[in-house]
Image (cartoon, rainbow, N blue to C red):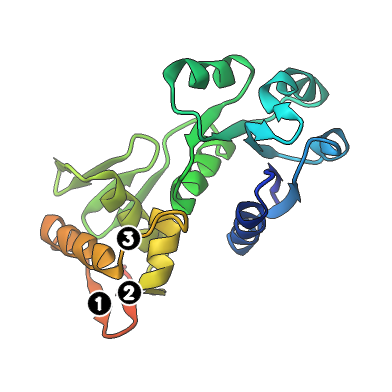
């Protein structure tokens, strides 16, 4: 099982995202500070690192941690300036995610760092989804999807037949740190149906949505 080391001092975010990763099939160890990082680093396959820890900027410690074992590191931060993102990459991080973020987006970035080199694609009927390039093609024509529409499409296709409650879709795609309404989900489902009529998305009144499995 893939081992993820989550280093995040926010208790609500740390506990919540650890459980989310476990539910997604990962083995996740959560630390709230840098004191025991060296002890757990060697066992990890990927690290999610909050930039601002109680001890200070974690990027100052990242190079020495990477000397223990060179693994992918995704930095979480509230810092949005370009030069600060560059600092993270220069320190050895493979990716940089700005808070607040959606769980689904971070999950996609985790998979992108863990999978072997090469393109990853999904198919549904005549729809082809290139995950690494974030491109959707239907009947040979490339479609223009907004970021949240793409994330919603990806989630539904990866979980064909599964019922998603509206609140669950809000949490997975928009994140619990933002507060859109369930109407936001309904509007994005409507946009997907209009852009991709081949998607057989069933509405479960008072519950949510389910993508009917594609015929073999």
- In the structure shown, which secondary structural element does the residue marked by tag 1 occupy? strand
**For residue 208, above or below residue 10:** below
Residue 210's disc is: 2
Q: Nearer the viewer, residue 81 or 216?
A: 81
Horizontal side of residue 150 vs 175, given as left or right: left
- In the structure shown, which secondary structural element does the residue marked by tag 3 occupy? loop
Which residue does the image show at 26% across and 52% down from the upper left? 149
**For residue 26, above or below residue 23:** above
Q: Earlier in the sequence, mark 2 or mark 1?
A: 1
Residue 180's disc is: 3
Horizontal side of residue 46 vs 189, given as left or right: right
Which residue does the image show at 53% across and 29% down from the upper left? 95
Give how far across and how far down residue 22 sits, in percent: 65, 60
- Looking at the image, do the residues carrying marks 2 and 1 touch, with CB atoms under 8 Å apart? yes
Q: CA distance from mark 2 to mark 3?
A: 20 Å
Dot 2 crowding, Cα within 10 Å, few <14, some 14–19, many 20+: many
Horizontal side of residue 74 vs 40, given as left or right: left
- Looking at the image, do the residues carrying marks 1 and 3 touch, with CB atoms under 8 Å apart? no
Q: CA distance from mark 1 to mark 3?
A: 22 Å
Dot 1 crowding, Cα within 10 Å, few <14, some 14–19, many 20+: few
Q: Nearer the viewer, residue 78 or 191?
A: 78
Which residue does the image show at 47% across and 58% down from the upper left? 176
Q: Which residue is mark 1?
A: 202
Q: Nearer the viewer, mark 1 or mark 3?
A: 3
Give how far across and how far down residue 201 sits, in percent: 24, 71
Choose top left, top right, bottom left or bottom right for residue 167.
bottom left
């Amino acid at each position: 099982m893939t081992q993820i080391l989550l280093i995040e001092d926010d208790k609500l975010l740390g506990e919540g995202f650890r459980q989310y990763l476990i539910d997604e099939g990962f083995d996740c160890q959560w630390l709230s500070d840098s004191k025991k990082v060296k002890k757990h680093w060697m066992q990890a396959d990927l690290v999610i690192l909050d930039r601002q820890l109680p001890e200070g900027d974690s990027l100052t410690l990242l190079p020495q941690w990477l000397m223990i074992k060179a693994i992918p590191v995704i930095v979480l931060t509230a810092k949005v300036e370009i030069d600060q993102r560059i600092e993270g990459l220069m320190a050895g991080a493979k990716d940089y995610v700005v808070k607040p973020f959606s769980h689904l987006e971070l999950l996609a970035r985790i998979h992108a760092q863990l999978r072997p080199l090469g393109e990853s694609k999904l198919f549904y009927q005549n729809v082809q989804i290139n995950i690494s390039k974030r491109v959707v093609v239907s009947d040979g024509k490339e479609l223009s999807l907004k970021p949240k529409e793409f994330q919603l499409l990806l989630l539904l296709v990866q979980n064909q037949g599964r019922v998603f409650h509206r609140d669950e879709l809000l949490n997975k795609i928009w994140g619990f740190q933002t507060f859109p309404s369930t109407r936001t989900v309904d509007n994005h489902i409507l946009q997907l149906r209009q852009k991709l009529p081949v998607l057989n998305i069933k509405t479960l009144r008072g519950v949510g949505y389910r993508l009917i499995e594609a015929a073999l």
